[in-house]
Amino acid sequence: MLTLTLTFLVKTLIDLYMMVLLLCIWMQLAHSDFYNPFTQFIVTITDPVIGPLRRIMPTLGTLDSASLLLGCMLAIIKFPLLIMIEMRCLILEPIYLLVGLLALLKTAGELVFWVLIIRSLLSWITQGHSPIDVVLYQLSEPLMYPIRRVLPAIGGIDFSAMVLILILYTLNYLGMDLFPGIWYRL
């Protein structure tokens, strides 16, 4: 009975921390303002774990390899850990490396989805006057601009976020079709 609750809790915590790690990587690749309060918050919550890893692993250009390594490690151990909670036995298979990469891809898609949703909601509320708006703009604009070039604003309404969310939903359903049973559990 507690198995479902524990599975939900472990999956949610791992997913959230993987999203924060991927967000840290994404902000570095997008050259987000380091002195922005939101960026400082992300750095603060990742630094206790990533800081020691950065001493061991050098960055690869603008790619934060320590965050990527930890995100991959979390993605790889997530599926066996969930199976261990549900079945009460540890099963290690080489296929879990591929499952971990799938989990990382799915989490990256979910992160993009939430960045778009939060940016859209904040555009109605804060109208660009919040520090988080700047970071979300820097993250999402490279993804939305190519769509906006093909589909300009109609009647003053920008549909690029909706088109991008539709693409993400399509990719999610493609993952369900290609990896039935596993994609749902990731």
Image: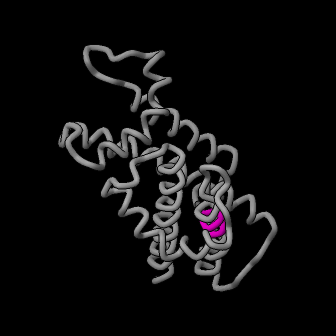
Which residue lies at the image location 81% right of the left edge and 67% below the top edge?
94
Q: Nearer the viewer, residue 158 or 57?
A: 57
Which residue lies at the image location 51% right of the left edge and 39% below the top edge?
168
> Eyeballing the image, is 56 above or below 37?
below
Chain part drawn in magenta: 69-73
Q: Kindly tell me whether residue 181 is visible in this rendering.
A: no
**Percent coordinates x, y for residue 141 in the rendering:** 43, 33
> Eyeballing the image, is 146 above or below 100?
above
Q: Kindly tell me whether residue 158 is visible in this rendering.
A: yes
Predominant secondary structure, magenta span = helix
> Eyeballing the image, is 153 above or below 51?
above
**Percent coordinates x, y for residue 6 in the rendering:** 48, 79
Q: Quadrant of the C terminus?
A: bottom right
**Percent coordinates x, y for residue 161 in the rendering:** 39, 32
Q: Is 70 in the magenta?
A: yes
**Percent coordinates x, y for residue 64 in the rendering:** 59, 57
